[in-house]
Image (cartoon, helix red, strand yellow):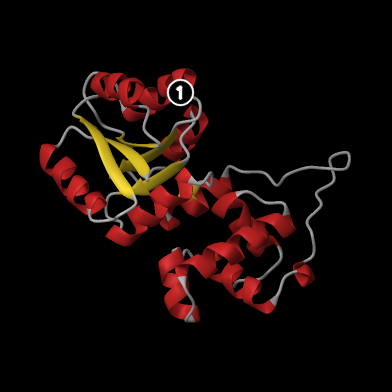
Amino acid sequence: MIRILIADDQGLLRAGLRALLSSEAELEVVAEAGNGEEALKLAQDFNPDVALLDINMPNMDGIEVTRRLKEVLPEARVLIITVHEDESLLQEAIKAGAAGYIVKRAVESELIDAIRAVQRGDMYIHPSMTRALLGGMSAPKRNGGVTVDPPAEALTPRELDVLKLIARGCTNRQMAEILSISVRTVEGHRANLMGKLNLHGRVELVRYARENKLID
């Protein structure tokens, strides 16, 4: 069971999120907050697996809540949900310790995928914002500062299919439909990709795909 805290100053939005998340058997909303201070207190009281935080909240914004929450509950996973498709806010949220950033215009299945991703330790960036994060991200350096990436030839044809779809911004559910496989199988291929390529999360997979010219 994934235990979730919802923090947003709009009561109707919180109610909608609760209804959506409660429809998934493995998700449980354990607390709701209408402002930043309340969100921080309830997070410490309930110790949720995932804190779903709006950026714009009274008393304390979502990024500051994230920063303080990670100080007292370092294992908590924070998913920022916002109307702002802004590169500077995205960068600030990640620096504060957020594990994900999703925009409110996302479809319901994307939010569910995002929650599952951050809970298992991945980073989730909404596809519309992936390019923004890549713009401020340098490739990992190893071997005395020389960039080393494992060859794409190490991947199976199906793993390459999944990598290309990830780079195009597809969710796990969309990839499963396109490839006619289960979501669990997609998740398995994704885990294999990250293991073989020594990469961590969607952003690094997208960077790898672009640098190796696996997508147009």
Q: Nearer the viewer, residue 141 or 7?
A: 7
In percent of the image, x 50 and y 80: which residue is there?
A: 179
9 with respect to 102 (left or right): left
Residue with the most extreme bottom position: 180
Q: Is residue 8 above or below residue 201?
A: above
Give the quadrant of residue 13.
top left
Rendered location of residue 94, percent (x, y) = 49, 35
In percent of the image, x 18 and y 41: which residue is there?
A: 14
Q: Is residue 73 above or below residue 122?
A: above
Q: Residues within 10 Å of mark 1 (few under 14, many from 20)?
A: some
What residue does disc 1 label? Answer: 73
Q: How many numbered badges does the structure rendering display?
A: 1
Q: Is residue 66 above or below residue 41?
A: below
- Quarter of the image containing the C terminus? bottom right
Rendered location of residue 191, percent (x, y) = 61, 58
Q: Nearer the viewer, residue 32 or 169?
A: 32
Residue with the most extreme right position: 144
- Residue 107 visible in image: no
For label 1, the SS is loop
Rendered location of residue 165, percent (x, y) = 53, 70
| Badge 1 amino acid | Leu
- Residue 43 visible in image: yes
Give the quadrant of residue 89.
top left
Rendered location of residue 36, percent (x, y) = 27, 23
